[in-house]
Every structure is written in C-alpha cells, then in structure tokens.
Amino acid sequence: MFADEELVMELLVNAGQARSDAMEAIRCAGQKDWQGATQLMASSESACLQAHKIQTALISQDEGCGKIKVNLILIHAQDHLMNAILCQDLAREIISLRKRTPCLIFSSSAIAGGNYYTLKDKS
C-alpha cells in the first residue's frame, strides 16, 4: 500500500510553511522586529507540529513492517520536514545572536594612499 497521498501532501505543505515562516522570522529579526520574529517562529512551530503529527500517523500505519511503499513524493515530504526543523533550529540561533549583537556597518575612509574600513554602530 502506498501512503495516503492527501496525508503526504499535507505533510509537505505544513513542512514548507514551517520553513518559510522560520526564514521570514530571521528577516524580521534583521529589521529588529522582535514581535514579528516571535510570531513567525510560533507559526513555524505550529506548522511543524502539524507536519510531525502526520509523519507519526504515517509511521504508525507502517507499523515498522514496510507496509507503506515509499515513493518519491513521500521522500520529498520527509526531506521538507527535516529541512524545516533544521531551519527552525538555525533561526532560533540567528535571532538570539541578532538580539545580542549591535548592528554594525562598514564605513570606508581615505587614508594616505588607500582606504581602510571601520566598524560603526548603525543604531
């Protein structure tokens, strides 16, 4: 038996949403929109939880006996879930770093015969 195609598509959609929300949370943190970053991470975690529930249901149907035939779309959906989880882990770290690190920019200044760069606090 092949995995229920509707379940697999739901897994794929939720995992994709989880990844997209985590990436958008990183962008919000880059703009110091901490509330937006927090909301998007919560949305990402909710979508990932839904995807994980579907994954658990599929594993339960298989009963560890190979009852579910593996096809390309199932592998693709599992890959999306794995990437979403990794993206969430990295997003948490990046957001934490951005909260603790002042925003720095490069400033070029002429100096006898050349240029040099200094770091300036942008905020």
Image: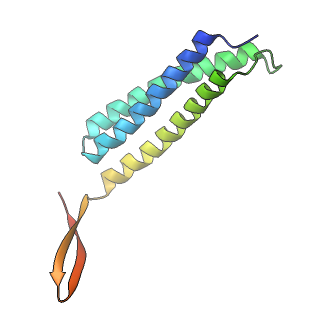
- In the rendered image, residue 110, in percent from the top left (x then y), is placed at 16, 80
Q: Nearer the viewer, residue 45 or 82?
A: 82
Q: Residue at x 65, y 20 (%)?
A: 56
Q: Residue at x 27, y 35 (%)?
A: 35
Q: Is residue 78 left or right of residue 2?
A: left
- In the rendered image, residue 121, in percent from the top left (x then y), is placed at 20, 63
Q: Nearer the viewer, residue 5 or 29?
A: 5
The image shows residue 14, relative to residue 61, as above or below, that is below
Q: Residue at x 31, y 58 (%)?
A: 101
Q: Is residue 61 left or right of residue 26?
A: right
Residue farthest toward the right in the current orientation of the protein: 65
The quarter in which the C terminus is drawn is bottom left
Q: Quadrant of residue 21?
A: top left
Q: Is residue 26 visible?
A: yes
Residue farthest toward the bottom in the current orientation of the protein: 112
Q: Nearer the viewer, residue 110 or 29?
A: 110
Q: Is residue 26 left or right of residue 82?
A: left
- In the rendered image, residue 119, in percent from the top left (x then y), is placed at 24, 70
Q: Quadrant of residue 54?
A: top right
